[in-house]
Amino acid sequence: MVHNILIVDDEVNSLKVLSAALKKAKTEVDTARSGEEALKLIKKKKYSLVISDFKMGGMSGEQLLEKTKTISPEVPFILLTAHGTIELAVNAMRKGAHTYLTKPVNLDLLESQVNDILVNGISLAKKTGPGTFQFLNILGQTPAMHEVFSLIRRVSKTDANILILGESGTGKELVARAIHYTSLRADKPFIPIDCTTIPGELMESELFGYEKGAFTCAVERKLGLIEMAQGGTTFFDEIGDLDFALQKKLLRFLQEKEIRRISGKDKIKVDVRVLSATNRNIEESLKNEEFRSDLYYRLNVISIHIPPLRERMDDLPLLANHYLEHFREKNKKEIREIDQEALAALKSYDWPGNVRELENVMERAVILCPHDTINVECLPKKMQIFDGAEYAEVKEFNLPEIEKRTIIKALDKTSWNQSKAAVLLGISRKQLRTKMKNLELLHVADE
């Protein structure tokens, strides 16, 4: 795949040097000598990346960044400047820049950043410490994920409470971190709170803290997680599991923007943005009176729904190859690629564990694969059996192959319950077992 890159700089020599460096990597490079000229090109053509000088005559690089994001919010953007400061970098990141490099540009660093963008897709900035940046990759190129990226950019500049919805393993915490680290609170704490792992009897003290002597083991004052996030963001993961009695206290905090430690006399003002997430059907919880409606409406000013992996299968090759690169390097393996049949097997699977499950599968495949290419045999047994018709047209009218596919579909439909599958197929369980043995399916069923 050839990527289109746009380089914007009012210095001719700089354009020549950058263009020559980036044309090496199977890219097509366009250039513009002003922000105004660049904007015309961006309106006409789809770019994989825009690289712009910060200070130019007329429209600045920062202004071009803002205008580009209104036209094509998914396009990664790199800003260059001769006067780099942390403040400028943070501001650029908040406005949606992928990264920020100083001039004269280190071409090796630039090529590395460009390769990261083109290989890994869209990235969102993550600030890991004073003056230190890395990139928190939320990968996706499907329209559903572009909508998620667009919502992140729009809500991150506000203080609105956001409810992130999605199945387990879809990346809800990644979205929450992306919102925080591209917000005006990026240099303040991000405090995740897992509502499923903190015991109910301890949750109140964890959230609000306590004073010395509040109970037997309270030998000193303890700040709660909400107070620790002062000026920043709290992320309530799996908020649907929060104890019903505590929901009222959380609601009071959201309404009054203040807390009181256990056994404390004084109310403490807290400026904290609240993000929350759940994999539950929260509206069903409201009907069953398991979740307070008044709290729900406070938390759900804006909702972001993350689609499950099975609904964004066009992203699977991108994600699988990303994890291949990551685990190949981590485990020092010489694995180059995933073959097409293995990709087809991955795409035929339903992915109940979503992206997290894919990550685990790819790590396993990289570790166990004895070849330089991941093939079907490197995948878990449950993924080795799939309808690979596009890779086996010659078997289209092969009776045993058709019988095998029919049996597998019946077993899949009954969660591999052989008695129920036999009923679906109109044969006895004994007959089914015999056929499965002949088709070498028994070892899979018995695993």
Image (tube, grey):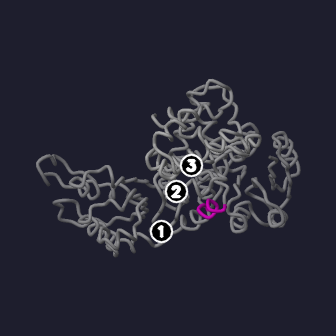
2 or 1: mark nearer the eye: 2
| Label 3 SS | helix
Give the mark nearer the N terminus: 2 vs 1.
1
Q: What stretch is highlighted in magenta?
A: 143-149
Q: Is the magenta stretch mostly helix, strand or loop?
A: helix
Residue 144 shown in magenta: yes
- Nearer the observer: mark 3 or 2; the answer is 3
The relative height of residue 247 versus residue 97 in the rendered view (above or below) is below
Q: In screen coordinates, is 328 left or right of 246? A: right
Q: Residues within 10 Å of mark 2 (few under 14, many from 20)?
A: many
Q: In this view, does 260 lie above or below 172?
A: below
- Tag 3: amino acid: Lys
Is tag 3's residue or tag 1's residue first in the polypeptide sequence? 1
- The disc at residue 159 is 1
Q: Which residue is denoted by mark 2 in the rendering?
A: 175
Instruction: Determine the secondary structure under disc 2.
Output: helix
On the rendered structure, is 347 left or right of 447? right
Q: In which quarter of the image is residue 241?
A: bottom left
Foreground pick, 316 / 64: 316
Q: Nearer the viewer, mark 3 or mark 1?
A: 3
Does dot 1 land on a helix, a strand or a loop? Answer: loop
Question: How many numbered marks does the figure carry?
Answer: 3
Report the residue at 40% width, 56% height from top: 237
Alpha carbon of mark 3 to alpha carbon of mark 1: how far? 49 Å
| Residue under label 3 | 409
Q: Dots 3 and 1: beta carbons under 8 Å? A: no
Reading the chain from its start, which is encountered first: label 3 or label 2? 2
Residue 114 in picture, x, y percent from top left: 73, 45
The percent coordinates of residue 119 (x first, y second) are 70, 44
Q: Position of residue 70 (x, y in %)?
A: 69, 68
- Determine contact: label 2, label 1, CB under 8 Å: no
